[in-house]
Amino acid sequence: MSIEIKNFIVEQIGEDAIVGVQETGLQGAIYVNEKDLVSICLLLRDAPAYYFDFLANITAVDFHPEPYFEIVYHLTSIPYQKQLTLKVKLSIDRVEDKLPEIDSVTTVWRTADWHEREIFDLMGVYFRNHPDLRRILMPDDWQGFPLRKDYVDPETYHDIPVK
């Protein structure tokens, strides 16, 4: 199914929209160009042949020491009982400590709101155009992003030992 959907995306959006296809592992995935992410998601949600009406999950994978994350979108078509995984490779500059950025898909699926906030909070990925991007699990003044592989626990938080 991934190849069929890949071809559909190429026909509708263009060759540059697809970066690659992962055919190994438990579930295949389509790597999409970050700049086309929202357009691809809208296309897959609204296309009568696919109708991916439910965003089951979004997650981020840290490939430390490599300078990139992968943002992984798990889509589901409830009426067709199909699943699809989209991935975006996102560069990260660990030296400058500048947050990597990607467009929010909250305009496509409202469930993205909480998923994106969790990724922002724990991995430090900034979602452009998110309606309320703020920490969701960690305190507002917490320093760092606990699920990054290069994260180091602080010794104290407000003079309370963390370890």
Image: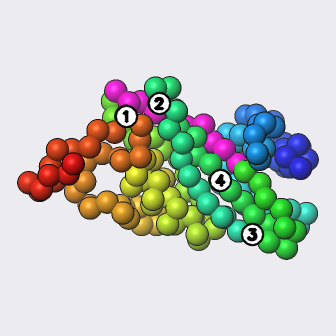
Query: Left or right of 44: which side holds 121?
Result: left
Is label 3 in contact with label 2 (beta carbons under 8 Å)?
no
Q: Which residue is labeled 4 in the image?
A: 73
Q: Which residue is labeled 2 in the image?
A: 64
Vertical position of residue 84 compared to residue 14: above or below: below
Q: Which residue is labeled 1 in the image?
A: 150
Check disc 2 and give the amino acid type.
His
Q: Earlier in the sequence, mark 1 or mark 2?
A: 2
2 vs 4, front mark: 2
**Residue at position x 29%, y 38% from top?**
152
Q: Earlier in the sequence, mark 3 or mark 1?
A: 3
Check disc 4 and give the amino acid type.
Tyr
Is label 1 in contact with label 2 (beta carbons under 8 Å)?
yes
**Residue at position x 58%, y 69% from top?**
111
From where the camera sits, is residue 47 visible? no
Q: Earlier in the sequence, mark 2 or mark 4?
A: 2
The circle on residue 136 is: none
Q: Which residue is labeled 3 in the image?
A: 53
Expressed as whole percent of the image width and height from the top left, the position of residue 102 reads 53, 47
Label 4 to label 3: alpha-carbon separation:
13 Å
Expressed as whole percent of the image width and height from the top left, the position of residue 147 reads 41, 46
Label 2 to label 4: alpha-carbon separation:
20 Å
3 vs 1, front mark: 1
4 vs 1, front mark: 1
As rendered, which of 11 and 66 lies closer to the eye? 66
**Residue at position x 12%, y 56% from top?**
160
Vertical position of residue 96 compared to residue 79: above or below: above
